[in-house]
Amino acid sequence: MFFKHITMFMFLIFIINTVLVTSADLKPEYYSKTCPQAEAIVRNIMKKSFLKEPRSVASIMRFQFHDCFVNGCDGSLLLDDTPTMLGEKLSLSNINSVRSFEVVDEIKEALEKACPGIVSCADIIIMASRDAIALTGGPDWQVKLGRLDSLSASQDNSSDIMPSPTSNATTLIDLFQKYNLNVKDLVALSGSHSIGKARCFSIMTRLYNQSGSGKADPAFNPSFRAELFKQCPLDVDQNKTLNLDATPVIFDNQYFKDLVDGRGFLNSDQTLFTFPQTQGLVRLFSIDQNEFFKAFVEGMLKLGDLQSDQPGEIRKNCRVVNSHPAPHVMYEHMT
């Protein structure tokens, strides 16, 4: 009888931790009472990471997009593969691209020491992404928190959902609309490419066989195209990285100035200027950085509102789900 009671208690704890709290509303200062130092801890570690390797913050800033588009902002991006689950890290859009997971590990370790079991990995992504922008000269804003971490991840979902660097504006607009993100959100959030680098792999088609033509994309500025031919020849190691814009460690509106000048790196970038429906916003952001910053923050907040409808938890380690007693085992003991 005692064993049955203990088993029932464990099952109830499992249900409470993984189901009932999924209805928690997101709000600013969510951890003000339970872990008031949470945001300061995240900011300080992001600062150290930026000083050590500037590219790391650009990588982490993209975590929010890569996580939230796949079943909501639930930290599923951070889960490592297991014998029974292929996670998102090796999906087509993430492999050899999404990096710096060790910075999130460091943040989580510090938060667990300060406030064990309180701050979710999903919220770490939101805070760290915001900090990456602020630390590189971009806007700062108050984020809404209170998310839970997923119990699983799906490589297939990530590969099927995330856009390709060869995507055109029509494809991107259609994709963003599925998540209630409008054309302005698309163009503004694409400005995340104001910082960081990308691989030659991402532009080989655009350089050498755009639309099956056997030629480069005619939208290239001729001098930029010549530069890329030198940097990314056909026999290049395609993991070689180049800057996404002319100021790769400063979050500013240079990205949009580059698009106007035909110096966008990815096809999914330059298409925003060649496509009539998005060209006006690119021009606007290229001449008005404040408008870009305002639209970017609005887009990031909307992106952060994408929620999972699945049960969740607060992971102790962002790479693995917590250990839980299997419900079917407990039901067997309770019969």
Image: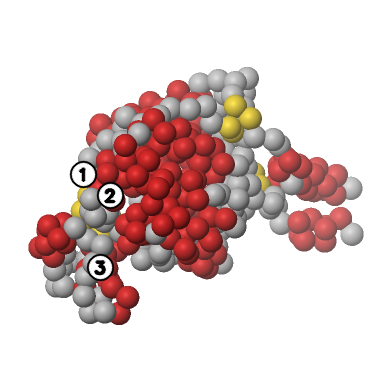
Marks 1/3: CA–CA distance? 20 Å
Q: Which mark is residue 214?
A: none
The kind of residue tagged 3 is: Asp
Q: Pick the residue in front: 1 or 204.
A: 204
In percent of width and height, residue 29 lies at 59, 24
Disc 2: CA contacts within 10 A as few (<14), some (14-19) or many (>=20) = some
Assign a secondary structure to mark 3. Answer: loop
Above or below 127: residue 167: below
- Sequence-first disc among 3 and 2: 3
Q: Residue at x 35, y 33 (%)?
A: 289
Q: Which mark is residue 217?
A: 3
25 left or right of 200?
A: right
Q: How many marks?
A: 3
Q: Residue at x 76, y 59 (%)?
A: 329
81 left or right of 239?
A: right
Q: Which mark is residue 260?
A: 2
In percent of width and height, residue 212 lies at 30, 79
Q: Residue at x 40, y 48 (%)?
A: 280
Q: Quadrant of residue 199?
A: bottom left
In percent of width and height, residue 188 lies at 43, 44
Assign a secondary structure to mark 1. Answer: loop
Disc 1: CA contacts within 10 A as few (<14), some (14-19) or many (>=20) = some
- Sequence-first disc among 2 and 1: 1
Marks 3/2: CA–CA distance? 15 Å
- Sequence-first disc among 1 and 3: 3
Find out whether the residues at labels 1 and 3 contact each other: C-beta distance under 8 Å.
Answer: no
